[in-house]
Amino acid sequence: MTKEVVGQRFVDEDWYAAELSSRTYRDCAFVDVDLTEAETSGCRFEGCSFEQVRLNASIHRQSSFTACTFGTTSFFDATLEGCRFDGSSFVRCSLSALTVQGGSWWGVSLVGADLRKQVLRDLRLVDADLSEADLRDVDLRGSDLSGSVLRSARLDRADLRGTTLAGADLTGAAVRGARLDLLGAVALSTSLGAVVEPD
């Protein structure tokens, strides 16, 4: 039976290596909670806030974090398999050495996020705000960035083959050495104000 927790505040708690399955947390606050090496499966976090939470080396399978806020939270070496972060925001978070396997990050706010060298294939990033994000050397093959905001983002050497960029705002983005297929090149040119016409 699914356990549902609503409106609770968890402060300075040790959840090291905790195993959470099919639980729901709604409008809860997690402050300075240690979730290092924790595992979640089929859990739902809705409208929750995470402040100074440690999710290092944690594993999350088919869990959702919708409309959540993450502040100064560490995801170092975390694994996200088929997870949803729709409508969530990340501020001053550590996102290095992530393992991401698909999932939906629709409408996420990752303004200024450091995602260098991450593998973010087959990820739904529709309407995401990646303004000023560092995406150098990122592998985004097969991801959907339709309608996303990439203003002044750094996409140098990023692999964007098979990536959907329709309607994306790439104003001021750095794309030196980025790998694009034909559709991606057209979308990039259009975003930068060029008119692409057949011969």
Image (cartoon, rainbow, N blue to C red):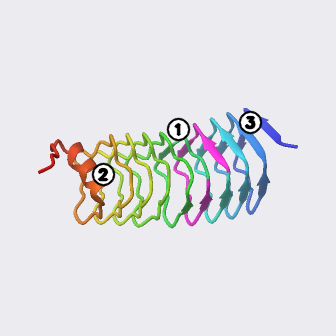
Q: Label 3 crowding class (10 Å Cα cut-off): few <14, some 14-19, many 20+?
A: few
x and y percentages locating residue 38 in the rendered image: 71, 60
Q: Residue furthest right?
A: 1
Report if residue 70 lies within the magenta region: yes
Q: Which residues are magenta?
A: 63-82
The three-letter amino acid code for the residue at tag 1 is Gly
x and y percentages locating residue 149 in the rendered image: 35, 42
Q: Residue at x 30, y 58 (%)?
A: 155
Q: Label 2 crowding class (10 Å Cα cut-off): few <14, some 14-19, many 20+?
A: many
Q: Residue at x 69, y 37 (%)?
A: 28
**Element under label 2?**
loop
Quadrant of the drawing holding the N terminus? top right
Q: Which mark is residue 8?
A: 3
Q: Residue at x 64, y 50 (%)?
A: 32
Which quarter of the picture shows residue 138?
A: bottom left
x and y percentages locating residue 182 in the rendered image: 27, 57
Q: Nearer the viewer, residue 199 or 142?
A: 199
Q: Residue furthest left?
A: 199
- 82 above or below 98? above
Q: Counting residues from the N terminus, which is met first, the one under dot 1 or under dot 3?
A: 3
**Element under label 3?**
loop
The Cα atoms of the two marked residues, 1 and 2, are separated by 20 Å
Q: Which mark is residue 153?
A: 2
Q: Residue furthest front?
A: 199
Q: Label 1 crowding class (10 Å Cα cut-off): few <14, some 14-19, many 20+?
A: some
Q: Is residue 113 left or right of residue 88?
A: left
- What residue does disc 1 label? 87
Q: Which mark is residue 172?
A: none
Q: Is residue 29 left or right of residue 195?
A: right
